[in-house]
Image (cartoon, rainbow, N blue to C red):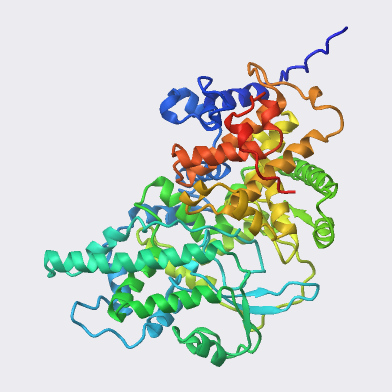
Amino acid sequence: MPTTAPPPECIDPVCKIAASSIQAKINWNFDPCIDFKNFSCSSPSQSNGLASLRAIRSAQEAVDTQMQQLLQHNTTSGPFRKLGRLFGSCLRQTTNSSTIRLVLEQLGGYLPIGALGPSSIAPLLSNIYELGPTPLVDIYYDLSYGKNPHVLLIISGPSATAPILESKIRWMGPKAPPYRLKQTVPKLLNDLLDSFLPNGLTADQKASENEAISTFIKELNKIRVEYTRRGFWDSSVLYNTSSLQEIYPILNWTTLVPSDWSGPIVVRSSDYLKAIGELLSKYPTRVAHNSMLLLFALGVLPQGHPNAVVCTRATMWALPDITSALFIAQHSSDDISDVIRRTDIIFKSLKAHLKRAPSLKGAALVKLSALKIQSEPWSGFSNITFMIKTLESLEITSDNWFENILKIYQRNRIVPDVIHTNFTSHDAWAYPIVAKIFYDTLSHSIVVPLSVILVPYFDGRLPPYLQYASVGVAIAKEILRSITKAFEDKAMRCVPKSVNIFSNYSRMDILIHSGGMQISYHSMLSLTGPIKGMARLPGLNLTPTQIFFLVSAQELCAESDYTGIDTDAPEFEHILGWLVAQGGSATEVFKCPSGSMINAQKTCNVL
């Protein structure tokens, strides 16, 4: 009986590089059926330095690294020199600058021990809102959903924690994806406290003030994390500021909501505002006042002690349009067109597979049929002349980051006298510098940043299983998120409790990640022609299906590592093992015996 010849080996040099990247993170001393995490994602301490350099990085890390190079070497002169000036001002920023002290003094300054606090901190928050990013709430304009959208005034969580410094009108250009907060104290808090508290305090007084302010900020951050995790499903609509004032008396809404606004007011999370009210009632207004001043300053400052990496992220946050234009200018239009075309092919393949799922019916099936993908970049990013003109109009100094950001904020908060609502399309665009695919409700589309598809594993010369394991899983997750919200019960029943360790992961996210792997895996298997025909990677003694699970795991490890999650924690190992067990047929693929970890953990089919 003739034996089937093994599939051919890919001879393109790019396949050799991909195999080397995958190999760099594998530790063959571990059995994938027993310890998939340490088999697929060995930590740097377990591998040599050269292997670590070859290992694939997360899409966001790749963006940050490229932008750091551009800011350090391509913005010292020429049209983007003001971007370089902003980057330089971040590197020189200190927490004890005279500008910070002056601005905080203008807002009322430090209220000492024994001083009578204000009757309400509402006036302070109104003054902060006039100046810069706000520590409690953000107020902006967006559109309602449906065929004939109208303008809404939205009240949501704090703007100071967003991935980009956004303008007040949200539908006029690209969008930032939903983001998660980390349940940690801001890195610069202690340094800022040292310069904020007067020198005349005794050691005990200083310790007491430190404790009071830090505890307030920790509690506030815990509330922020909890309520951003829940999404926007508990929005409520009001029609005037007097109703707003009556229900949420913690702020002076007449100074925050424009006096000429007569349209609907949407409160994105009423529970969040109520929780904030309860927090403020627990603390003396003196402590709340001092804490708000520091939170305001922390929202303007870089997110860590200034260095090239921190300041690259801070510069992208402050001027996302300009930095996105600089990023896109590094890639040829042919390369961009090619990845967009192939993204569309994968999207159609994932949709076609899902449409055949017997459990998907009714409204979910209708939503799936209407779902679109948007991976075209916003045309404004290619209009370098306009971008340079915008940059030139900004007054940016080379030695005062704090002042620069307040000026950029003032530009962003300008709202035209007439807000145009004659929409020709409902397209949504992504910022390529924020490497996260997301679902946009208004346009009912999966929005794909270029940085996510301009990655090594999405190279058109590579076998499809690498593309499905990376970009395919990421798109499938958002497709799942777009068609149904009815996963709460399943998430509580079958997602392991170890997920609770990670503050920026929720059960729902883990369940959706599991579903994304399942959908992408089975879509890959249903490609025309048998998977046996997919080319093997040179020097890697693994099948295409084994490589799919391996690369999916390595992608999650790289992303988690870069966002600060401890991937060596036992809980992470447990979650990764559980995910691989759900995501297709890993038990058969790795020939795991009955009772092994991967075999025993399969508990949760999403569809």
Q: Position of residue 330 (x, y in %)?
A: 61, 43
Q: Which residue is drawn at 45% across and 24% down?
A: 47
186 lies left or right of 349: left
474 lies left or right of 506: right
Q: Position of residue 219 (x, y in %)?
A: 38, 66
281 lies left or right of 457: left
**Farthest top residue?**
1
| Residue 69 in view in this figure | no
**Farthest front residue?**
595
Number of marks present in the image shown: 0
Residues 200 and 266: in front is 266
- The image quarter containing residue 461 is top right
- The image quarter containing residue 99 is bottom left
Residues 265 and 382: in front is 265
Q: Position of residue 548 (x, y in %)?
A: 68, 32
Residue 600, above or below 519: above
Residues 391 and 404: in front is 404
Residue 358, above or below 319: above
Q: Residue at x 25, y 75 (%)?
A: 110
Q: Where is residue 473 in the image (x, y as percent from the top left)?
A: 68, 43
Q: In which quarter of the image is the N terminus?
A: top right
198 lies left or right of 573: left
**Farthest bottom residue?**
242
| Residue 280 in view in this figure | yes
Q: Which residue is drawn at 80% across and 48% down?
A: 354
